[in-house]
Amino acid sequence: MDTLTEPFHPGDHVADDAELLELATFLAGGVAARRRCLTLTWLDADDRLLGLVMPVSDLPVAPEPSTLPGLGGLMGAVLAENAPGGSVVAVLERPGDPAINAGDRAWNAALRAQDDARVRGVFVAAGGAVRPLTLDDAYDAGDAPDAP
């Protein structure tokens, strides 16, 4: 796992949605992704940054049901060990247009459906922009996305 460097530091309070978007933008780096990657970071119960960052590379367009229990277990295990009552922030980096697509919605729904961890925010970094995915952007993960 990598640790965060400036402008965010372990222990920094992520107070609101604007700061959460700043954190997601920081995690996405240049937001010119050439491949699909999911970057996870964690906040404690007081919304303070743990400073742990985990990139998961080579993602499929939509989550594969067989891998979700492991991903959910990982998200929850970090919280259980380091920040009980905390939450996860996820940034899906992908090439292409910044418009939210079916694959983004499938990842949003799958991440939010994990029982092992509370998700504070899901973001998409694509086409030079970082956008939040809301609960309204999620849909039944059983629906198959049409395009990458």
Image: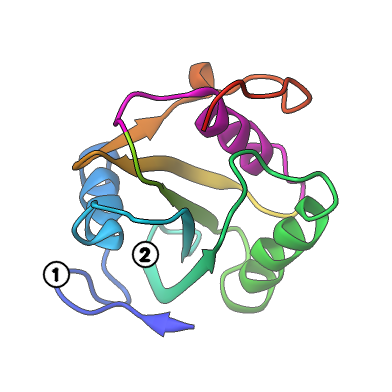
The residue that appears at 55% across and 27% down in the rendered structure is: 105
Q: Return the residue at label 2.
A: 48
Q: Nearer the viewer, residue 112 or 102?
A: 102
Query: Is residue 93 in the magenta section?
Result: no
Region in magenta: 97-115
Kindly give the residue lying farthest to the right in the view shown.
66
The residue that appears at 47% across and 24% down in the rendered structure is: 101
- Give the percent coordinates (x, y) of residue 89: 46, 53
Q: How is the image coloured?
A: rainbow
- Give the percent coordinates (x, y) of residue 138: 57, 23
The residue that appears at 71% across and 71% down in the rendered structure is: 77
Q: Is 67 left or right of 95, judged from the image as shown? A: right
Given the image, on which type of amino acid does mark 2 rest? Arg
Q: Is residue 50 above or below residue 139?
A: below
Query: Is residue 98 in the magenta section?
Result: yes
Which numbered disc, 2 or 1, marks the residue that appears first in the sequence?
1
Q: What is the CA distance from the residue labelled 2 to the residue labelled 1?
A: 14 Å
Q: Nearer the viewer, residue 42 or 36?
A: 36
Element carrying mark 2: loop
Q: Is residue 55 above or below residue 94?
A: below
The residue that appears at 48% across and 45% down in the rendered structure is: 120
Q: Return the residue at label 1.
A: 7
User: For residue 125, which quarter of the picture?
Assistant: top left
